[in-house]
Image: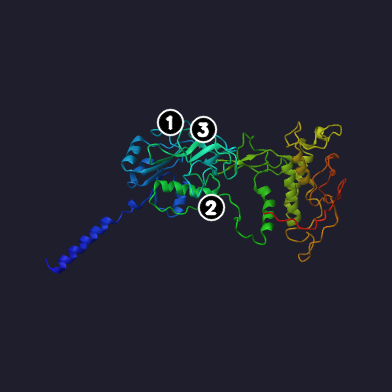
Amino acid sequence: MNRLGTLTLLLLSLMSIEARSQPSPADSIAWTLAGRPDNDLFQVLKAASASCQRFDTPAQAIQAAPRGSAVLLLADGYPAQRTILAQADAGLALQKSLRLYIEYPTALKGLELGEPAYQKTGHYGSVLASNFFEPKLKKMRIVMVHDCHYLPVKADQPHLVFSQVEGYDNAVYGITEAAHPLLFEHPAGNMLVATTKLSQFVTGRYAPTAAWGPIWQRILKYLAPEKTIPPLEWTPTVRPIFGPDQPLPADALDKAVRRGVDYYQKSRLLIHKDWPAQEGTTGIDPAWPLGDGSLGLGECYISKRLFVDGSQAVSRSARTDCNLEAAMGLGYGVTLYRKAPYKTLAHTLNDLIFLNSPVCQGKRADPQSSSYGLLSYHTGDVAGTFWGDDNARALLGAIGPQPPCSNPIAGTTPSSAASSPTPAPPASIAIAPRPSMMAPFKSKAGNTSSISNTSITARTWRHSSGPPTSVSTTKLASSPSSNAPEPAHV
């Protein structure tokens, strides 16, 4: 063999050795997931360019995973269906030295898993029960797995539990002995078990958002200790417009007030006669029609009741104070921003409370009754249940938009030119309702609605541009500091 042939043979040998030393594309995969393509964890990992792959079933994922790598079996049928890990697949995972994460399983060797249980959040929350997530997250940190369905099980030293808890950021009194494990290490090792679905953290709006990135980074690090964990970022479905350290633009307050005024209709809380009767605290179907205000505005979205799909429970009770406060906000929308369509809605809400519901009727309208002048709790409260703070807020809502006032947002009065300065408030302000803004008490038969327990007496009003049927006013003396502007809260 000549010198050229020898050199060629040597080069080919070196290339063969180099090729054998390079890992195959499959060997570079750190995490193999079994779940749907739209699973939150998979989507976040893809966005982070993490070395992961996905398959539809646990069997496919375990079969395809490189030896010694991590496999995550996700509960995409949650809460109706649990994750099945067949004995043959568990055996193959053991043979391949895979490190497993499984959530909401049907059965696991060495554990006695109970039937799914459910406890609505409120005084219950999820708490980090060990040092597993340190240093980023300290033990006793409260996090929220909303709409938590879990499997009762006994586990030593769980990392995350579901417990009755008191505190805001941290469980100030610790956790109860009856706390339910949500995340723990399997006694046999090389496996993390979640008794609920933790991979729903984006769709389910798990909170706080800032905690769930570190939680998943720590889980992924446990499964692949030698790998570098990328930052995990996503855009929350519901979020503040500005961050805590973000400077506010000059028009931030103006925009906040405008959005607040618009929210009453965009909230979808206007009750419609064709809505089905409420059973428990369900949400509002987007397909349901919206009311015109004649049945009122539902109380609120309930912050303690978020569902698996991210939707939120609603209280559809048309509370007196909520509806009068909403009418006040709409009244300011008419005055400050010339949103004329909101005038009719404000009138309708006030008519409902003062004339077209039991709130001010019956004994509440009888001067001989001990409840004369009080306002019932909500529009369905015929017997009369009274809350002092609710009555106070309701009355403030009824009179709030009525004074002739300047526009504190835009800096001008509604009728003034843009360049005109805002006039200083007088020493006293006459509180007199203006039909152009709030004419809530339209009469069908000369009815009056009296609020006798306060210094304000509201009587029948007409929707027309004419003067009110009767006016009772009161003067509010301004305090020495009344000329000073109030601090803006956004």
Q: Is mark 2 on a helix, strand or loop?
A: loop
Return the residue at label 3: 117
* Label 2 to label 3: alpha-carbon separation: 30 Å
In this rendering, which labeled residue sits more in front, label 2 or label 3? 3
Q: Is mark 1 on a helix, strand or loop?
A: loop
Return the residue at label 2: 235
Return the residue at label 1: 112
Rendering quarter of residue 285: top right
Q: What residue type is labelled 2?
A: Thr
How dense is the environment of label 2, judged by Cα within 10 Å: few (below 14), some, or many (20 and up)? few
Q: What element carries label 3?
A: strand
Going from N to C along the chain, the mark reached first, 1 or 2, is 1
**Residue plotted at (33% across, 51% down):** 27
Q: Horizontally, is 86 left or right of 351 in the view?
A: left
Q: Horizontally, is 238 left or right of 226 in the view?
A: right
Cβ–Cβ under 8 Å for marks 2 and 3: no
Going from N to C along the chain, the mark reached first, 3 or 1, is 1
In this rendering, which labeled residue sits more in front, label 3 or label 1? 1
Viewport quadrant of the N terminus = bottom left
